Structures are given as C-alpha cells and as structure tokens.
Image (spheres, rainbow, N blue to C red):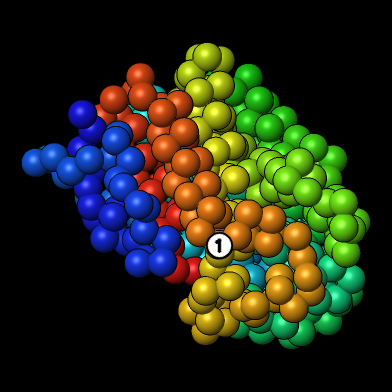
C-alpha cells in the first residue's frame, strides 16, 4: 500500500476534507512528505522561470517586463510540479523536463492574462496583484500573452537537452493541442458562449472544463512521462489520471469561489454567483460537489495503481488539488 500521508491530508482545508480517506492514500510508516516535495519543486520552478525570460535589447524592455510581471507573480506552480512528478515516475531527470515545466507554466500564465482581460472575465486581481492589463494596458497585455505563448514553444525546442528529438516533437504537439480548439481556447469559447444559457447543463460544463482546465494538466503529466520515455500505454494511464484531477481542480475552484475570500484566493471571490455562471455547485449543490471532487480524485489515483510507490508524488498532488485553499 502506498505511503502518502498526510502531509497531503494536513493540507486539506476543513471545507474540502473528504468524508473518508481515499483507499490508495492511507497513512503508513514511511510517509511520503508531500509538503517538502512541493516546496522543493516550487523553488526549482521559480528559479527556472526567473532564468527563462530576459530583455536582451532596450526595445523589448516593456513587453518583457509585462511578461515577467505575470510569470513571476507567484502562483502555486501545480503544472510544473505535475511535469516533474510524471517524469520522475518513469525515471526521467528534472533537468531534461525543466524547459517543458517552464513552457507549460508560460502557457498557463498566458491564459490567465487573457482570461482577465475586459473582453473576457474582466478582472483586476490575479495572484494577489493587479492584473496585467490594469498595469500595462489591454494592448500590451494581449501582446504579452501572445509572446508568452510563442515563447513557451521556443523555450522547449531551444532548451531541452539530452532527450531524443522525437520525444521533444511529441511534447510540442501535445502543448499545441492543449491550447487549440480542443484545449484552452475551445473551452474558453464555449464557457463564454454558455453564459446565461439556461440549457447549459452538466454535459456542457464537463466539456468546458475538460478543455479549459483539464487539458493543460493532462498535457503537463503526459509531457513529463513522454520525456522520460514512458510507453503509449503508460502515457494513457497518466492522461486518465490528469483528466480526473483536472476536473476535480475545477470543481474545487468553483467551491473555493463560494467559500474563500478574495484575499485568500488572490483573485475576486464570489464572481460565479454574481454573474450567475454555470458551475458545479450551481448544478449539483455544494455538498454533492465536494463528494464529486473526492470521487474524481479517487478515480485519478486508481488510474495510477500499477505504478506503486513511484506514483506517490502524483497521488499526493491529487489530494492537494482538492485540499488547497487558493
Ligand atoms: C489565447 C490561445 C489562447 C487561449 C487562452 C483565456 C483562455 C484562452 C482560457 C482560459 C483558461 C483558464 C483561465 C482556465 C482556468 C483554469 C484555472 C482553474 C486557473 C487557476 O489555476 P491555478 O489555481 O492558478 O493553478 P495559479 O495562480 O496558482 O497558477
């Protein structure tokens, strides 16, 4: 039985605590220290992000400042952690996966910059700070997001070392797919078009979040596994895990929007209700949403059962995703 304890469960907010612990995450003597694991990966990620973007000529000072403002604004760095945890599960090196972890976080940050724009969610608070367009204007914010998206691909292609070229090409393909019509952009469009649609039910909501939220988490885990040489079958198991935690992530997000404060979240709380958005709590109620989040995490863990103790970081991260407070 796997040894994840409780540092994972210690991270659980009372609000999101599961009714009963997931069977694969029972405490044993040799506990996996998720808190330390996450902190090490966060520090490693921050250093990699810090080194990834620099203005090299005065003409790029403004756009690079704007890009760096959002990229270095904090954030939980869950997606890079997923890249690293997946690559380590298959014996890959952190160094080889680092450019992909950076690229995935760049894609995520781009999506947050664009999501906050007046034409989309129109928000002025993100990661506890003014949003990019509030400081730099809509024009620069749009371009900073565009530049960050293209830099994500360039960074992976330029910086990944010691990995067979065909694996890098596969990673670039997955990164592209997860942003396109069957990824972030497609999910966001359906989300925008479903606002105030009384017919938007569970099927629509699941499609939106499979693409808008889960696709990037799935890409992170798949890319980490591929860089380490996982087989197609192994990657498919990782993708199932990531789809489930991606949906759980969104259910938790919807719950936090109701139960946490803007200060805790670092972004505007209570927005879903204010805009009458279709969310899991709106369709299922708060209590059932919490149960669903736990069920999704249990299913995610089950997808990795064959990997034994090597899956400990991914299992711990699954717990964290619904236990987080922001
Ligand atoms: C421009 C091609 C293109 C695509 C972007 C704007 C957009 C299309 C998509 C929106 C995607 C989005 C913002 C989804 C929400 C995902 C989500 C739950 C984000 C919060 O992630 P956390 O909690 O944030 O990991 P931190 O700040 O911790 O990194």
In the image, what residue occupies the spot 29% across and 25% down? 308
In the image, what residue occupies the spot 37% across and 66% down? 13
Measuring from the top left, give residue 315's x and y in whole percent.
36, 40
- For the image, the number of numbered tags is 1
Kindly indicate the quadrant of the structure image that contains residue 71: bottom right
In the image, what residue occupies the spot 41% across and 28% down? 302
From this view, report whether residue 248 is shown above or below residue 326. above
Measuring from the top left, give residue 23's x and y in whole percent.
29, 35
- In front of the other: 271 or 109: 271
Judged left or right of residue 226, residue 180 is right
In the image, what residue occupies the spot 56% across and 21% down? 236
Query: The N terminus appears in which quarter of the rendering?
Result: top left
SS class of the residue under badge 1? helix
Judged left or right of residue 267, residue 233 is left
Judged left or right of residue 226, residue 204 is right
Q: Residues within 10 Å of mark 1 (few under 14, many from 20)?
A: some
Q: Where is mark 1, residue-wise?
A: 286
Measuring from the top left, give residue 65's x and y in whole percent.
68, 75
Judged left or right of residue 298, residue 130 is right
Query: Can you tell me which quadrant of the image ligand 1 is in?
Result: bottom right
Disc 1, ligand 1: is the CB inside 8 Å? Answer: no
Measuring from the top left, give residue 198's x and y in whole percent.
87, 58
Asked if residue 323 can be seen in this view, the reply is yes
- In front of the other: 186 or 158: 186
């Amino acid at each position: 039985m796997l040894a994840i304890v409780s540092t994972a469960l210690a991270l659980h907010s009372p609000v999101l605590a599961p009714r009963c612990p997931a069977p694969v995450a029972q405490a044993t003597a040799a506990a996996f220290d998720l808190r330390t694991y996450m902190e090490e990966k966060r520090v490693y990620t921050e250093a990699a992000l810090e080194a990834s973007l620099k203005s090299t000529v005065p003409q790029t000072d403004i756009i690079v400042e704007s890009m760096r403002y959002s990229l270095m604004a904090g954030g939980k760095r869950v997606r890079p952690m997923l890249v690293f945890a997946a690559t380590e599960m298959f014996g890959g090196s952190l160094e080889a996966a680092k450019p992909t972890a950076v690229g995935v976080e760049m894609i995520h940050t781009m999506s947050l910059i664009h999501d906050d724009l007046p034409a989309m969610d129109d928000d002025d608070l993100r990661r506890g700070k003014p949003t990019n367009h509030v400081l730099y204007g809509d024009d620069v914010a749009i371009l900073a997001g565009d530049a960050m998206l293209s830099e994500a691909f360039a960074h992976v292609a330029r910086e990944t070392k010691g990995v067979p070229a065909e694996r890098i090409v596969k990673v670039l393909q997955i990164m592209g797919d997860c942003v396109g019509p069957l990824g972030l952009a497609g999910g966001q469009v359906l989300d925008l078009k479903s606002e105030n649609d009384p017919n938007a039910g569970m099927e629509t909501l699941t499609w939106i979040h499979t693409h808008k939220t889960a696709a990037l988490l799935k890409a992170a885990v798949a890319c980490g596994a591929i860089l380490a040489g996982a087989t197609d079958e192994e990657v498919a198991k990782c993708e199932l895990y990531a789809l489930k935690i991606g949906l759980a992530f969104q259910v938790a997000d919807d719950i936090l929007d109701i139960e946490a404060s803007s200060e805790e979240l670092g972004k505007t709380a209570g927005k879903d209700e204010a805009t009458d958005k279709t969310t899991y709590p709106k369709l299922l109620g708060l209590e059932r949403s919490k149960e669903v989040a736990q069920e999704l995490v249990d299913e995610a863990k089950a997808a990795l059962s064959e990997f034994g103790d090597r899956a400990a970081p991914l299992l711990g991260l699954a717990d964290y995703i619904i236990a987080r407070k922001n």
